[in-house]
Image (spheres, rainbow, N blue to C red):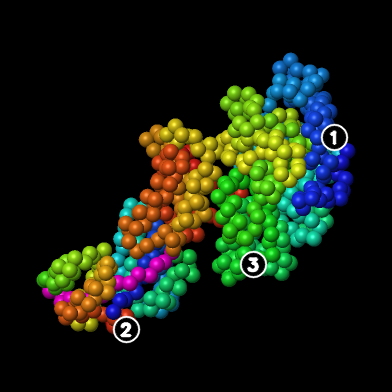
Amino acid sequence: MEVRQISVFLENKIGRLAEITQVLGNKGINIRALAIADTTEFGILRMIVDKPEKAYEALEERGFTVSQTEVIVVEVRDKPGGLAGVMAILGKAGINVEYLYAFVAPKGSNALVVLKIEKLKDAVGLLQAQKVKILSSKDIGRL
Amino acid sequence: MGEGDVSPLNMFSGGTMIWNKEYECMDRDNLKELQLTRLKEVVRRVYERLPFYRKKFTKNHLHPDALKSLEDLRKFPFTRKPELREGYPFGLFTAPLEKIVEFHISSGTTGKPVVNGYTRKDIQVWSEVMARALACAGTTSKDVVHNAYGYGLFTGGLGVHYGAQLIGAKTVPISGGQTRRQIMIMQDFKSTVLTCTPSYALHIAEVAEEIGVNPRELSLRVGILGAEAWSENMRKEVEVQLGIDALDIYGLTEIIGPGVAQECEAKEGMHIFEDHFLPEIIDPKTGKVLEEGEEGELVLTTLTREGTSLVRYRTGDITQINYQLCECGRTIARISKIKGRVDDMLIIRGVNIFPSQIENVLLQIEEAEPHYQLILERKRGLDELTVELEVSPNTFFDEVKRVEKIEAKIEKEIEDALGLRIGVRLVESRTIERSMGKAKRIIDKRKSK
């Protein structure tokens, strides 16, 4: 149920994001979701793409420092309180969320939330028991 | 006189190779006598041939006759780089122009270039000391010397070339650049001795890995690396990456080029060829001559050069001298690895540091890449130093706090070693310029604003 997230180290310089998206575009890789965590000196670009393996190789080849991380993508209903239910389940179990970012599925009205959490396996079991839909890599590819 | 003569390679019982045992293992009293004889000639030659020396000596009430012992040299004034610039292009030769057969000219990035003119005999001396240097690293006629020092006005390329030719080694005069091609040639010609700057040696290893060649599987056995100050940990890094022994060589264009001093396989300092170059270590502030083992600026007097003779030339290089007998059997003195240049010394919040000290710390941190640069800026009237270090899979994570933790760890290691807190900033990989020659380690942004 885990999905592979691609992270790229970025200095805060003009044009770097354009270069990354171009590299991926040229390789026919589709970015499903993306978020940037930034500090005053550097940023970390995190992405969910349809072909993570290919994206990793393409970026590394171009000299970017890239890492891969296991995350989960859950579906929440796109209405007030949708995310709260998921957070409550994790909170109750004492599972910490390192970071998250959300995007809206192209089809349907549900929001998709990318979660980096500690104790990933426990979290997956817990959420599934509570009927939270977790997307697989295949699901991401089909979006 | 042995210089210039082709000596048979002398082997000591331990297998140490010594090119010219007569001079490199000379009894020290005899050596001093030889040095004094030669020194008297040099002092007389510069006095007679160069008005600028004559003026300097006269101003200090000195005449060549005042030199009766090696210690008397201390009375004589120093020669500094700006004085050499004044002589550009032909003004500083101590031999008639028609006897000069080769020029080497410094890059002149900080002013008018410095010229060194060589007579035929000077080229022989250069070949001799470079043959000794190569032999210090065990080079014989069986070796293939991959010479990646730049050929041309820079002394590195031709200096190694002359020495390798005298030994009869097979020389690949590849010069710098085109690194992929260099690796291909090293593979095909089974090069055993690599001569280049230490930073270029690392770059070769990096490019080899990139094109799927294991640099440790090349035939290379030893590297003779110089033209920049490098730390003991940089040595370890090069040795691991290339699977070789990395030995330090010292020289400078003003004196002759490479071949002033060379490390032997004991790796405990560079043997200075004292029958050709007379070393002194001085306090760079007071000019006072320091004792054996004290750290200071290296001052050199050429003893056998004809074209460009210099008396008490201030090299600007910081080192110390050791007169103890080396395990290799050489009796000539050793200078320690160059710690830095007098003008490279940074004073940050009252602490004196050299870039090589920071390099030494960085390279013992497992996660740190050997690609770094020091940014010097002036903030609120104070000099501030920042280390820029290339990020690598070892230092990069998807979480900001983990990346910041790594930066903090490196900052702490530097603080523990140097007693100074210096900011560390990770930068994208491959953004720090790779050098084909001397690596540029300090970016001084103080003057541009």
* Most foreground residue, B435 or B335: B335
Q: Residues within 10 Å of mark 2 (few under 14, many from 20)?
A: few
Secondary structure predominantly adopted by residues drawn in magenta: strand
- Residue beneath label 1, please? B96
Q: Which mark is residue A138?
A: 2
Magenta-span inclusion, residue B217: no
Mark 2 or 3: in front is 3
The residue at 55%/50% (across/down) is: B233
Report the chain holding disc 3: B
Element at badge 3? helix
* Most foreground residue, B266 or B226: B266
- Residue beneath label 3, please? B217
Q: Which mark is residue B411?
A: none
> Range of the magenta residues?
A65-79
Amino acid at pointer 3:
Glu
* Most foreground residue, B301 or B150: B301
